[in-house]
Image (cartoon, rainbow, N blue to C red):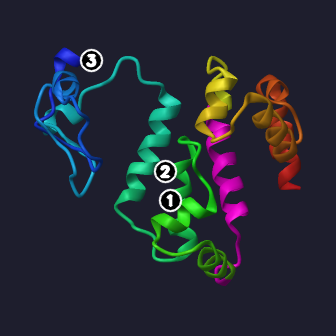
C-alpha cells in the first residue's frame, strides 16, 4: 500500500498549527484540524482492511495488543501509569514528573498511589521496557540504536547495560539463543 492508495477523510491534531500548514495538507491529502481535543486520522472502513506489504508481523502483533487495550481504560493507578509509560517511552520523556503532569498531579501523588497498588514507577517502567525490548530485539534486522531510542534510552550503551542487568545476557547472546535458556531459568 502506498500513500497514493488511501487518503484520510479527516485528520485531527491536538497541538497548535505550524506556521505553514501546506506540508500537512500535502502529506495527508485533506484538511488538518489543529488544536483539536484529540489526535485522530479518520479513514474509510475499507482502508482499515487493507494489508500493508511493508508491515513487520511482530510489530503488527504488538500494535494489535495495544489497540485491544484502548477499549478497556484502566481504573487503577498502576494501569493508568502503565498506559502512559508505553505512550511516552519512545519520546525519551518518560519520567515520573512527565507522567504526573499528564495525570494533573505531582510526582509524590504518583508514588503514593502506586504504593497503594503495591508497585513503583521504576518497576512499571522496567516491566514495560522489558516487554517492548523482547519484541524488538527478536528482530535481528532492527538496529540497536533504533531500539535504544524506542525504549527511551539516550544511547545504545545505556540500552546494553540495562538489557544485561534485566535479562542476564547481552543482546547479541539473546539473539543467539540465550533467550530460551534465560526464560527457562526464570521459570524455575
- Residue lying at the far front of the rendered structure: 19
Whether pointer 3 and pointer 2 mark residues with C-beta atoms closer than 8 Å, the reply is: no
Whether pointer 1 and pointer 2 mark residues with C-beta atoms closer than 8 Å, the reply is: yes
Disc 3 vs disc 2: which is toward the camera?
2
Residue drawn at x 64%, y 79% as measured from the top left: 117
Question: For mark 2, what is the residue?
Answer: 87
> Is residue 71 depicted above or below 158 in this figure?
below
Q: Badge 2, how many Cα within 10 Å: few under 14, some, many 20+?
A: few
Q: CA distance from mark 1 to mark 2?
A: 6 Å
Question: For mark 3, what is the residue?
Answer: 1
Residue 165 % position (x, y) = 87, 45
**Residue 57 within the segment the image draws in magenta:** no
Q: Is residue 25 left or right of residue 38?
A: left
Question: For mark 1, what is the residue?
Answer: 83
**Residue 132 within the segment the image draws in magenta:** yes
Disc 3 vs disc 1: which is toward the camera?
1
What span is in magenta?
116-136
- Of labels 3 and 2, earlier in sequence is 3
Quadrant of the rendered image containing residue 63: top left
Q: Is residue 109 left or right of residue 173?
A: left
167 or 158: nearer the viewer: 158
Amino acid at each position: 500500500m502506498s500513500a497514493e492508495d488511501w487518503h484520510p477523510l479527516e485528520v485531527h491534531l491536538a497541538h497548535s498549527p505550524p506556521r505553514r500548514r501546506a506540508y500537512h495538507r500535502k502529506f495527508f491529502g485533506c484538511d488538518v484540524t489543529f488544536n483539536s481535543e484529540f489526535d485522530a486520522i479518520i479513514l474509510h472502513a475499507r482502508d482499515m482492511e487493507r494489508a500493508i506489504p511493508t508491515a513487520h508481523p511482530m510489530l503488527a502483533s504488538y500494535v494489535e495488543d495495544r489497540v485491544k487495550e484502548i477499549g478497556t481504560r484502566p481504573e487503577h493507578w498502576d494501569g493508568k501509569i502503565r498506559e502512559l509509560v508505553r505512550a511516552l517511552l519512545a519520546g525519551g520523556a518518560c519520567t515520573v514528573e512527565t507522567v504526573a503532569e499528564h495525570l494533573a498531579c505531582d510526582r509524590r501523588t504518583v508514588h503514593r498511589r502506586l504504593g497503594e497498588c503495591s508497585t513503583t514507577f521504576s518497576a512499571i517502567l522496567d516491566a514495560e521496557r522489558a516487554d517492548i525490548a523482547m519484541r524488538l530485539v527478536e528482530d535481528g534486522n532492527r538496529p540497536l540504536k533504533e531500539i535504544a531510542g524506542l525504549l527511551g534510552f539516550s544511547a545504545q550503551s545505556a540500552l546494553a547495560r540495562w538489557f544485561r542487568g534485566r535479562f542476564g545476557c547481552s543482546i547479541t547472546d539473546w539473539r543467539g539463543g540465550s533467550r530460551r535458556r534465560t526464560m527457562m531459568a526464570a521459570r524455575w
